[in-house]
Amino acid sequence: MQLIELKGIHFGYDTYQAKVLDDLNLVVNHGECHCISGATGCGKSSLLHLIAGELCRPFEGEMMRHPALMVGLVMQDPNVQVLRQSVGAEIAFALENLGVPSNEMLDKVQQVLRRVGLYVSIDTPIDVLSLGQKYRLMLAAQLVFEPNLLLLDEPWTQLDNHGVQELYFVLKGLLRDGVSIVMVEHQPQAFGQIVSHLWQLERGKLVAGLYQPSGQHKQRLPTLAARGVDATEQRLLISPHRFQFSAGSALFRCTESLSVGAGEIVALVGDNGTGKSSFLKALAGMQADIGQLPFLVLGKRPKLGIYGANLCLLLQRPNRQLFEPTVLTEMQFSLRRFRLPLSRAERMLHQLSLSHLSMASPHKLSYGQQHIIALASLACLQPKVLLLDDPFAGLDSLHCDKVWQLLLQLRQRGCAILLTSHREVSYGDVDRIWYIESGYLTAIAAPTEQADAG
């Protein structure tokens, strides 16, 4: 049974960008799984929104839908879909609109929470969930009304490895039940065994795709001493502590002293919901309800506004850091604020091969493009400390490489960088790795350090 067919679709946002969809064709039948890859900003998310009927601008071409088509969509940033304040109310929203009797709702809500691996109370406030947990919540909110076509925007990016494995089995069961799936994904190999149609979105058209290696090509820099960086200058000092909110139990405990020195890149690795984002915000002095912690950042107790351009934080939701009308003015905003050369903005866009976006609105860019623009705006300041919350989210391998080269340049200048990830990071990519696991924050020695210790 054919659920939906797109024929000769043309769609674009404004005159500063080429059409993102240009003579695009796609047919989705009952029980098929389509995976669409493509460069950051090529229009993959726009295609999902078109299928879901949510585009705010008209398109050209034909779209035929089966009369029984019911679509569920999980966006790349689940925060934009949140409608209620608690987990149970969010999932029950669709059931209320479908007229499901209230005495049947609780069982359906609890079943779908277990199905997506989100084991929290239905009374849990949504704002305490991590981004990965919110992605699971939005998936549950779609599955509860039993759609026959499910659209997913880059699930691998938002979920840790355990979450991806759980999602894999959920999707496998849906396909077995005849539900169709269209997902956008930079890492199609993660779901390769269930994908029936693999596409590459290129120049506005879908072409049959092949799995491409997803590795990033990174180079280690010389040692700190060889770079002329004072390895004894500690930019971040973290003493033993319990990390917890005032009215809650500890997210994790740290029983050793940790530090990040000038010219070092340290990765903080942990699953969704372990407290990585809150930890970075606490270091920047902007995490509410966390209490006094034994942290020193640039020799001072963390407090919002005291570091000027010397400390920068990239949030996990890049759109919360973008507010200017064009990409160029966004890049220049903080430069102007701290009286730094505005020319740095144009040089940075040129370096990242993003000059063509200089007059585009940052609010109309893809999630990945917003991420790289937000990071580039911070990098222009050449800070002494850079805190990055999942900096490679939503980026294809080419843009990941560009971001990595940018971080290496900042490290060469002596910037101390702490970045988070919910996946393993190679010792060849960073100087040191911290883990949040089983309720503890610990530093694991690199293999060379372990050998020296032996």
Image (spheres, helix red, strand yellow):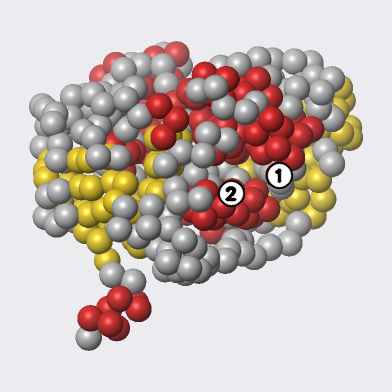
* Mark 1 element type: helix
Identify which residue is drawn at 54% across, 59% down.
Answer: 190
In the rendered image, the vertical position of residue 193 relative to residue 415, given as above or below: below
Whether label 2 touches label 1, CB < 8 Å: yes
Quadrant occupied by the C terminus: bottom left
User: Residue at (49%, 63%) from the top-left corner?
Assistant: 227
For marks 2 and 1, the one nearer the N-term is 1
**What residue is at 52 percent from the left and 19 percent from the top?**
337
Q: In which quadrant of the rendered image does the N terminus lie?
A: top right
Question: Disc 2 and disc 1: Cα gap in Å?
Answer: 9 Å
Q: Nearer the viewer, residue 169 or 188?
A: 188
Residue 320 placement, left or right of 446: right
Residue type at numbered disc 2: Leu
Q: Position of residue 154 (x, y in %)?
A: 56, 43
**Residue under numbered circle 2:** 406
Horizontal side of residue 46 vs 12, given as left or right: left
Q: Is the residue marked by circle 2 packed among few (<14), some (14-19), or many (20+) residues within 10 Å? A: some
Name the residue carrying label 1: 351
Residue 107 appears in which quarter of the rendering? top left
Seen from this angle, which residue lies furthest bottom?
454
x%, y% of residue 441? 21, 53
Q: Is residue 428 visible?
A: yes
- Indicate the amino acid at tag 1: Gln
Q: To which quarter of the image does residue 357 belong?
A: top right
Report the residue at 32% width, 46% height from top: 235
